Image (cartoon, helix red, strand yellow):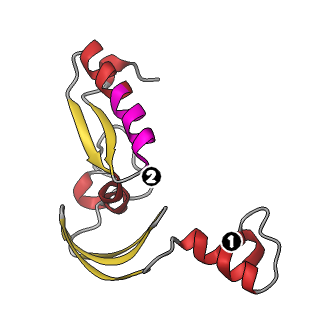
Protein backbone atom coordinates (compact mmCIF):
# COMPACT_ATOMS: atom_id res chain seq x y z
CA UNK A 1 0.00 0.00 0.00
CA UNK A 2 1.55 3.24 -1.19
CA UNK A 3 0.63 6.80 -0.36
CA UNK A 4 1.54 9.93 -2.31
CA UNK A 5 4.37 10.44 0.20
CA UNK A 6 5.97 7.30 -1.29
CA UNK A 7 5.80 8.68 -4.86
CA UNK A 8 8.81 10.60 -6.21
CA UNK A 9 7.14 12.22 -9.22
CA UNK A 10 3.88 12.38 -11.19
CA UNK A 11 4.21 11.11 -14.76
CA UNK A 12 1.64 11.46 -17.50
CA UNK A 13 1.37 10.70 -21.20
CA UNK A 14 1.73 13.89 -23.22
CA UNK A 15 1.46 12.40 -26.70
CA UNK A 16 0.87 11.16 -29.19
CA UNK A 17 -2.75 10.24 -28.64
CA UNK A 18 -6.28 11.57 -28.57
CA UNK A 19 -6.05 15.25 -27.65
CA UNK A 20 -8.98 15.29 -25.21
CA UNK A 21 -7.65 12.27 -23.32
CA UNK A 22 -4.15 13.73 -23.15
CA UNK A 23 -5.49 17.06 -21.91
CA UNK A 24 -7.62 15.50 -19.14
CA UNK A 25 -4.70 13.34 -17.96
CA UNK A 26 -2.21 16.20 -18.10
CA UNK A 27 -4.47 18.55 -16.14
CA UNK A 28 -5.09 15.95 -13.42
CA UNK A 29 -1.40 15.02 -13.20
CA UNK A 30 -0.41 18.69 -13.07
CA UNK A 31 -2.90 19.34 -10.27
CA UNK A 32 -1.60 16.35 -8.28
CA UNK A 33 2.00 17.45 -8.79
CA UNK A 34 1.27 20.97 -7.59
CA UNK A 35 -0.93 19.81 -4.69
CA UNK A 36 1.69 17.37 -3.41
CA UNK A 37 4.82 19.31 -4.40
CA UNK A 38 6.04 16.56 -6.76
CA UNK A 39 7.91 16.92 -10.06
CA UNK A 40 5.68 16.72 -13.15
CA UNK A 41 7.11 14.40 -15.82
CA UNK A 42 5.74 14.33 -19.36
CA UNK A 43 6.06 10.88 -20.94
CA UNK A 44 6.02 10.09 -24.69
CA UNK A 45 3.25 7.51 -25.09
CA UNK A 46 4.88 5.31 -27.72
CA UNK A 47 8.36 5.45 -26.21
CA UNK A 48 6.89 4.36 -22.88
CA UNK A 49 5.49 1.22 -24.53
CA UNK A 50 8.89 0.42 -26.04
CA UNK A 51 10.80 1.13 -22.81
CA UNK A 52 8.56 -1.28 -20.87
CA UNK A 53 10.55 -4.05 -22.57
CA UNK A 54 13.49 -2.94 -20.43
CA UNK A 55 11.59 -3.84 -17.27
CA UNK A 56 11.72 -7.60 -16.99
CA UNK A 57 9.11 -9.91 -15.49
CA UNK A 58 8.87 -10.15 -11.73
CA UNK A 59 9.96 -6.56 -11.07
CA UNK A 60 9.33 -5.49 -7.50
CA UNK A 61 9.14 -2.01 -6.02
CA UNK A 62 12.38 -2.47 -4.09
CA UNK A 63 15.63 -3.27 -5.86
CA UNK A 64 17.25 -6.47 -4.62
CA UNK A 65 20.24 -8.41 -5.94
CA UNK A 66 17.72 -10.68 -7.72
CA UNK A 67 15.86 -7.83 -9.43
CA UNK A 68 18.55 -5.20 -9.85
CA UNK A 69 18.05 -3.18 -13.05
CA UNK A 70 21.30 -4.38 -14.60
CA UNK A 71 20.11 -7.98 -14.30
CA UNK A 72 16.56 -7.50 -15.56
CA UNK A 73 16.85 -4.77 -18.18
CA UNK A 74 16.84 -5.52 -21.89
CA UNK A 75 20.04 -4.00 -23.20
CA UNK A 76 20.34 -1.78 -26.27
CA UNK A 77 20.16 -2.40 -29.13
CA UNK A 78 17.01 -4.53 -29.38
CA UNK A 79 14.09 -5.00 -31.77
CA UNK A 80 10.61 -3.86 -30.77
CA UNK A 81 7.22 -4.44 -32.34
CA UNK A 82 5.10 -1.45 -31.35
CA UNK A 83 1.38 -2.12 -31.65
CA UNK A 84 -0.59 0.72 -30.11
CA UNK A 85 -3.73 2.27 -31.53
CA UNK A 86 -2.91 3.65 -34.95
CA UNK A 87 0.80 2.92 -34.63
CA UNK A 88 2.17 -0.38 -35.87
CA UNK A 89 5.94 -0.35 -36.29
CA UNK A 90 8.88 -2.71 -36.20
CA UNK A 91 11.89 -0.80 -34.97
CA UNK A 92 15.47 -1.18 -33.86
CA UNK A 93 15.97 0.56 -30.53
CA UNK A 94 19.48 1.97 -30.25
CA UNK A 95 18.88 3.96 -27.06
CA UNK A 96 16.34 6.19 -25.38
CA UNK A 97 14.97 8.51 -28.07
CA UNK A 98 17.10 6.79 -30.74
CA UNK A 99 15.17 4.41 -33.02
CA UNK A 100 15.32 3.17 -36.59
CA UNK A 101 11.92 2.26 -38.04
CA UNK A 102 12.35 -0.93 -40.06
CA UNK A 103 8.75 -1.16 -41.20
CA UNK A 104 5.18 -0.37 -40.29
CA UNK A 105 1.63 -0.14 -41.49
CA UNK A 106 0.76 2.46 -44.10
CA UNK A 107 -2.79 3.26 -43.06
CA UNK A 108 -4.15 0.91 -40.41
CA UNK A 109 -3.62 -0.08 -36.85
CA UNK A 110 -3.43 -3.81 -36.22
CA UNK A 111 -7.01 -3.84 -34.90
CA UNK A 112 -8.31 -2.22 -38.09
CA UNK A 113 -6.38 -4.77 -40.14
CA UNK A 114 -8.10 -7.57 -38.21
CA UNK A 115 -11.49 -5.90 -38.74
CA UNK A 116 -10.89 -5.61 -42.51
CA UNK A 117 -9.69 -9.22 -42.72
CA UNK A 118 -12.74 -10.48 -40.83
CA UNK A 119 -15.08 -8.54 -43.13
CA UNK A 120 -13.29 -9.89 -46.23
CA UNK A 121 -13.77 -13.42 -44.86
CA UNK A 122 -17.42 -12.75 -44.09
CA UNK A 123 -16.91 -13.20 -40.34
CA UNK A 124 -19.00 -11.34 -37.75
CA UNK A 125 -17.12 -8.29 -36.44
CA UNK A 126 -19.51 -7.22 -33.67
CA UNK A 127 -16.98 -8.22 -31.02
CA UNK A 128 -14.02 -7.02 -33.08
CA UNK A 129 -12.18 -8.55 -36.00
CA UNK A 130 -9.37 -9.99 -33.88
CA UNK A 131 -11.51 -12.50 -31.96
CA UNK A 132 -13.43 -13.34 -35.15
CA UNK A 133 -10.24 -14.12 -37.10
CA UNK A 134 -8.74 -16.00 -34.16
The answer to which image quadrant residue 127 occupies is bottom right
At x 22%, y 16%, the residue is: 37
The answer to which image quadrant residue 87 occupies is bottom left
Q: Decide which of 81, 1 is in the foreground and name it.
A: 81
Residue 134 visible in the displayed image: no
Q: Is residue 36 above or below residue 51?
A: above
* Rendering coords of residue 22 (x, y %): 39, 41
Q: Quick one: quadrant of the C terminus? A: bottom right
Residue 10 visible in the displayed image: yes
What residue is pinned by disc 1?
Answer: 130
For residue 76, side relative to residue 134 (left or right): left
Residue lying farthest top?
35
In magenta segment, residue 66: no
At x 34%, y 33%, the residue is: 26
Q: Separation of disc 1 and disc 2 at Cα? A: 29 Å
For residue 68, side relative to residue 120 (left or right): left
* Rendering coords of residue 64 (x, y %): 30, 44
- Disc 1 is placed on an element classified as helix
- Disc 2 is placed on an element classified as loop
For residue 33, side relative to residue 119 (left or right): left
Residue contact at pointers 1 and 2, CB within 8 angstroms:
no
* Rendering coords of residue 35 (x, y %): 29, 13
What residue is pinned by disc 2?
Answer: 58
At x 46%, y 76%, the residue is: 107
Q: Residues within 10 Å of mark 1 (few under 14, many from 20)?
A: some
Query: Chief secondary structure of the magenta span?
Result: helix
Q: Earlier in the sequence, mark 1 or mark 2?
A: 2
- Residue interval drawn in magenta: 18-27
Amino acid sequence: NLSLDDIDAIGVTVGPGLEICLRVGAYKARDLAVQHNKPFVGVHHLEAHVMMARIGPGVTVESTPETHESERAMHFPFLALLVSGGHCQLMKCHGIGNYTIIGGTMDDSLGEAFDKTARMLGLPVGGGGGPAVE
